[in-house]
Image (cartoon, rainbow, N blue to C red):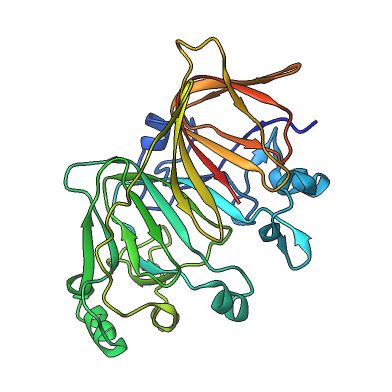
């Protein structure tokens, strides 16, 4: 039966992480720092699980749960094309860039990475890096890195809760300290670092940079400071929704659920084209169907197979609804 199920995340203890994924999202993961949770993933560097079993194995038995959309097929095999993360940046992340699919497939044998960030929390004064504030040359960037002055060439953008940033492959970027975000991306873990502030890992060595490859894929033209897009809430009985991002790789909607005063619950059913992954970022609620009930809480990610059974949603929650 095509019914929703909860995903168990993989976790990462990168040195720049904090404790808010445990404190604010109830992850109860014994890592410190806890930098990222990979909520919906079949990537070999960090797989989600279903009752202890790897999600990739579950989907291998039920490839129809991915839907009929063409992105699900990579190298003739049905695979989950997206990856959903929660990220807690206690410190600044490295200045980095991701290649597009063509370069990544040719040079690294994997997908590139276009991503979207949705800001769940931001401390006063929090910022991120988005591209260059002027058109630069490769020589200028190399010189700035050598002299410790790369920061002077970058666009620094103020960040607040509920901001949205679409980061296309080739855009130099960095998440700043004090931000907690949900990230929706291609299923890739390929990152080229330009600068990491001379930080030292647990092995006592500075983390690797990838300057040559980064400059092969980075857009060096001046980037306009990203403006927040016009966002329009559509209201219905018991819920409202707004489109955050639609691109060739994924679609993301924000859903505000509130059935406290509605006797008729919100109806939900996926079609044959795509699965849906719903990340609960506020509140709690439940899915129900014929002979079926699933409760969810803040921090949970729910996988709803394509062509699911008819469902009803109840609760008071905010969810990010990701599909292909």
Q: Nearer the viewer, residue 56 or 15?
A: 56
Q: Position of residue 119 (x, y in %)?
A: 34, 44
Seen from this angle, which residue lies furthest bottom? Answer: 139
Image-quadrant location for residue 278: top right
- Would residue 91 appear left or right of 260 to someone viewing this image? left
Q: Name the residue located 48 percent from the left edge and 63 percent from the top edge.
A: 114
Seen from this angle, which residue lies furthest right? Answer: 61
Q: Name the residue located 53 percent from the left edge and 62 percent from the top edge.
A: 189
The image shows residue 49, relative to residue 95, as above or below, that is above
The image shows residue 110, relative to residue 243, as above or below, that is below
Number of marks: 0
- Would residue 144 appear left or right of 266 to someone viewing this image? left
Q: Nearer the viewer, residue 259 or 78?
A: 259
Q: Name the residue located 62 percent from the left edge and 43 percent from the top edge.
A: 48
Q: Name the residue located 66 percent from the left edge and 60 percent from the top edge.
A: 71
Q: Position of residue 275 (x, y in %)?
A: 66, 43
The image shows residue 138, relative to residue 155, as above or below, that is below
Pick the quarter of the image with the N terminus: top right
Q: Position of residue 271 (x, y in %)?
A: 70, 40
Q: Position of residue 210 (x, y in %)?
A: 42, 77
């Amino acid at each position: 039966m095509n019914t929703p199920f909860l995903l168990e995340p993989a976790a990462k203890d990168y040195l720049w992480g904090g404790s808010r994924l445990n404190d604010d999202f109830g992850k109860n993961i014994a890592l410190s720092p806890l930098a990222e949770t990979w909520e919906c993933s079949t990537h070999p560097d960090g797989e989600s699980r279903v009752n202890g079993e790897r999600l990739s194995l579950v989907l291998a038995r039920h490839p129809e749960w991915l839907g009929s959309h063409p992105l699900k097929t990579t190298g003739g095999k049905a695979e989950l094309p997206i990856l959903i993360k929660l990220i807690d940046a206690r410190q600044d992340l490295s200045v980095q860039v991701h290649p597009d699919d063509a370069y990544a497939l040719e040079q690294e044998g994997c997908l590139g990475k276009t991503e979207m960030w949705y800001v769940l929390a931001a401390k006063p004064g929090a910022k991120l890096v988005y591209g260059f504030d002027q058109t630069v040359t490769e020589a200028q960037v190399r010189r700035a890195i050598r002299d410790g002055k790369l920061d002077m060439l970058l666009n620094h953008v103020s960040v607040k809760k509920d901001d949205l940033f679409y980061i296309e492959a080739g855009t130099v970027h960095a998440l700043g300290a004090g931000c907690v975000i949900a990230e929706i991306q291609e299923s890739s873990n390929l990152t080229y670092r330009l600068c990491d502030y001379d930080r030292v890992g647990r092995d006592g060595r500075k983390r690797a940079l990838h300057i040559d490859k980064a400059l092969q894929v980075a857009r060096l033209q001046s980037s306009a400071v990203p403006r927040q897009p016009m966002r329009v809430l559509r209201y219905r009985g018991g819920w409202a929704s707004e489109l955050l991002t639609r691109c060739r790789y994924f679609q993301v909607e924000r859903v505000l659920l509130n059935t406290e005063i509605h006797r008729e619950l919100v109806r939900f059913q996926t079609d044959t084209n795509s699965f849906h992954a719903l990340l609960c970022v506020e509140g709690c609620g439940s899915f129900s169907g014929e002979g079926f009930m699933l409760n969810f809480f803040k921090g949970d990610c729910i996988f709803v197979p394509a062509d699911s059974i008819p469902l009803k949603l109840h609760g008071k929650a905010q969810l990010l609804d990701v599909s292909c």
